[in-house]
Image (spheres, helix red, strand yellow):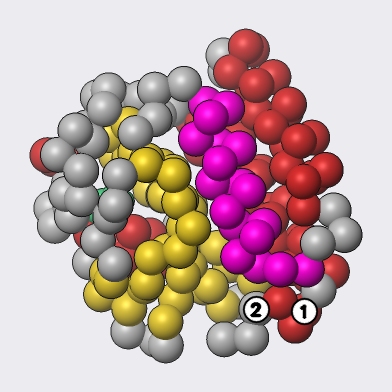
Amino acid sequence: MHAGKASLYDDLAVQLTSLIEGEADLVANAANMAALIYHGLPDLNWAGFYFADGETELVLGPFQGKPACIRIPWGNGVCGTAAARRETIVVPDVCEFPGHIACDPDSRSELVVPLIKDGRVLGVLDLDSPIPGRFDQTDRAGCEQLVAIFLDGLRASPAAFSL
Ligand code: SME
């Protein structure tokens, strides 16, 4: 594990905890988390959320970066696949991922973490990079830690997400 990168994620975890502490609004917390990640991690061209809309598709949530595709069918693309499989997906080269959805042609690698609360997939956190192989297992663990903090915030305010 890269010590510098791991400690960067530890710093982001502290900042995220502070940002969402005592705040119940899902969109506000997701927006601040997207901004924190986009500006806190190097070499990203997109960072944000897709939320479950019913049981058949994801819809765009708060993000930083260029405008993106609005709806992704469940099971499609990297985001829909991560949601359907209920597991984090690290894609070193998006050209090699069957069905990858190219919102920004500059994207070369991608990391998607599902948001799972009480057994339900609420959506995904999606990070894109213009650099091939940008994301490793430290990024995976770090982003899963950030998602856990985000979901804990929802637990403190169960009415915040009423899908
Ligand atoms: N590449 C994603 C689509 C979302 S954008 O990257 C913001 C995918 O294949 O699901």
Q: Which residue lies furthest to the right in this view?
A: 22
Tell me whether circle 1 and circle 2 mark residues in contact (CB < 8 Å): yes
Q: Is residue 36 magenta?
A: yes
Q: Which amino acid does label 1 sit on?
A: Pro
The numbered dot on residue 161 is 2
Q: Residue 138, located in which quarter of the rendered image? A: top right
Mark 2 C-beta to ligand 1 under 8 Å: no
Q: Badge 1: few (under 14), some or many (20 or more) residues near its Cα, within 10 Å?
A: few
Query: Which circle marks residue 21 in the picture?
Result: none
Q: Is-magenta flag for residue 42? A: no
Residue 90 in sight: no
Q: Seen in the image, is 57 located left or right of residue 36?
A: left
| Span shown in magenta | 24-41
In the rendered view, would you say 124 is above or below 48?
Answer: below
Main secondary structure type of the part rendered in magenta = helix
Circle 2: residue type: Phe
Residue drawn at x 65%, y 78% is 161
**Quarter placement of the C terminus:** bottom right
Look at mark 1 in the image and give the residue it sits on: 158
Q: Position of residue 40 (x, y in %)?
A: 57, 27
- Residue placed most toward the observer, 70 or 133: 70
Asked whether the viewer can see residue 64, the reply is yes
Instruction: Tell whether 35 sits left or right of 51.
Output: right
Specify few, some or many for label 2: CA neighbours under 10 Å numbering under 14, 14-19, or 20 or more.
few
Q: Is mark 1 on a helix, strand or loop?
A: helix
Task: Examine the rendered structure and indicate whether residue 10 appears above or below residue 68.
Answer: above
Residue drawn at (84%, 69%), measured in percent from left and top?
156
The residue depicted at 58 percent of the width and 54 percent of the height is 31
Residue 74 placement: quadrant: bottom left
- Residue 99 lies left or right of residue 36; in this view the side is left
Local SS, label 2? loop
Quadrant, the N terminus: top right
